[in-house]
């Protein structure tokens, strides 16, 4: 079953801007899917339509079997949203923000209090339950947004830049938690500019460009489209880089440069050429962010 079904979805704003030009997208139940694109590509409009904040111009959108036009309330109950901007009362206590959110979905307070305790403990916020949200760190505020989105036990969680401004340690702990709830059956739709998150966490990714879905496939198959890999090369001292121009080398400092190597090529041949250029390799590793390279390639097309 599809958790999200989008057919020929169009959105033209009153200003005449055509934000969506008839996109089609199916997200399977239980999937962890990324919606990627540059600023202004149409990601926020898609999320706005799914959550009822933006009225579509035409097309069909279903959340599970609920058409958002015919069964709006039922569809909305299926979704938890973590927006990019903080939009809770900064003077309200952490637990009250989560519990009060449950009230909008008709959840009894006694039930909401138990669920709130469990979710806040999972997100390492229970010790802050009586703290005014304005006193939380930026990372804790992000986790609070996730807690609030989960209080109605949504079958779909939509995350719009959930780790923006979050430090590396906290980002990884959030990844682990999102993996856990996904494994428990929650469908996740993610937008992010940290493309390493996509490669680490998502099973599918859709690239949206100028209001159209440009590519949609499994992350593994998308990555296979890349015919070049970027390596970070550490040497005793850089010299003779002009002899390696074929590899599109970029010097990072006097001991480090990046080089693009054809996928499947023998690294030993590359190292020998670096030696002939007068350098001694001390370390060689893939740059790692292949999704970023794919993203840039798609933007250029």
Image (cartoon, helix red, strand yellow):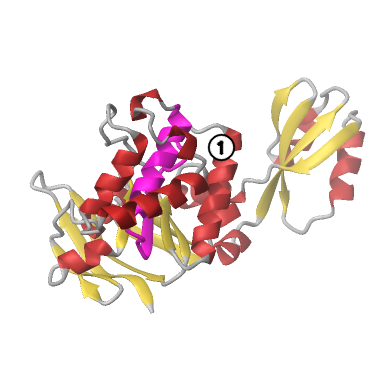
**What is the tally of numbered marks visible in this picture?**
1
| Whether residue 92 is situated above or below residue 25 in the rendered picture | above
255 sits to left or right of 236: left
Q: Residues within 10 Å of mark 1 (few under 14, many from 20)?
A: some
Residue 182 appears in the figure: yes
* Residue ID at (35%, 30%): 133
Residue 158 sits in which quadrant?
bottom left
Observer-nearest of 58 and 266: 58
Could you tell me residue 202's position as x and y percent? 53, 59
Q: What stretch is highlighted in magenta?
A: 137-165
Q: Tag 1's secondary structure? A: helix
Is 99 one of the magenta-colored residues? Answer: no
* Residue ID at (61%, 50%): 290
| Whether residue 240 is situated above or below residue 221 in the rendered picture | above
* Residue ID at (27%, 36%): 87
* Residue ID at (55%, 40%): 171
Observer-nearest of 106 and 158: 106
139 sits to left or right of 276: left
Pointer 1: what residue?
170
Q: Quadrant of the N terminus?
A: bottom left
59 sits to left or right of 278: left
Observer-nearest of 219 and 122: 122
| Whether residue 111 is situated above or below residue 6 in the rendered picture | above
Could you tell me residue 183's position as x and y percent? 54, 65
Could you tell me residue 12's position as x and y percent? 14, 53
Q: Residue furthest front?
A: 110
Observer-nearest of 288 and 21: 288
204 sits to left or right of 46: right
Could you tell me residue 56's position as x and y percent? 15, 59
């Amino acid at each position: 079953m599809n958790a999200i079904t989008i057919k020929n979805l169009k959105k033209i704003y009153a200003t005449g801007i055509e934000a969506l030009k008839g996109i089609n997208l199916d997200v399977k139940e239980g999937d962890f899917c990324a919606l990627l694109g540059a600023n202004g590509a149409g990601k926020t409009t898609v999320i706005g339509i799914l959550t009822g904040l933006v009225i579509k111009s035409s097309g069909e959108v279903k959340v599970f079997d609920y058409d958002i036009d015919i069964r709006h309330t039922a569809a909305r109950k299926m979704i938890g949203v973590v927006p990019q901007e903080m939009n809770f009362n900064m003077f309200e206590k952490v637990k009250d923000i989560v519990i009060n959110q449950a009230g909008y979905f008709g959840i009894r307070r006694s039930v909401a209090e138990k669920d709130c305790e469990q979710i806040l403990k999972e997100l390492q916020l229970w010790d802050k339950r009586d703290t005014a949200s304005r006193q939380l760190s930026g990372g804790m505020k992000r986790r609070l947004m996730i807690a609030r989105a989960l209080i109605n036990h949504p079958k779909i969680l939509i995350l719009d830049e959930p780790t923006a401004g979050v430090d590396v340690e906290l980002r990884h702990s959030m990844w682990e938690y999102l993996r856990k709830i996904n494994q428990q059956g929650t469908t996740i739709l993610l937008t992010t500019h940290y493309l390493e998150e996509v490669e680490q966490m998502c099973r599918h990714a859709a690239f949206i460009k100028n209001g159209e879905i440009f590519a949609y496939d499994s992350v593994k198959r998308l990555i296979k489209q890349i015919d070049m890999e970027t390596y970070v090369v550490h040497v005793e001292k850089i010299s003779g880089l002009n002899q390696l121009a074929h590899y599109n080398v970029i010097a990072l400092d006097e001991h480090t440069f990046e080089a693009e190597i054809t996928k499947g090529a023998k690294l030993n041949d590359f190292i020998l050429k670096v030696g002939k250029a007068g350098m001694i390799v001390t370390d060689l590793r893939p740059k790692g962010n292949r999704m970023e390279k794919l993203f840039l390639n798609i933007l250029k097309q």
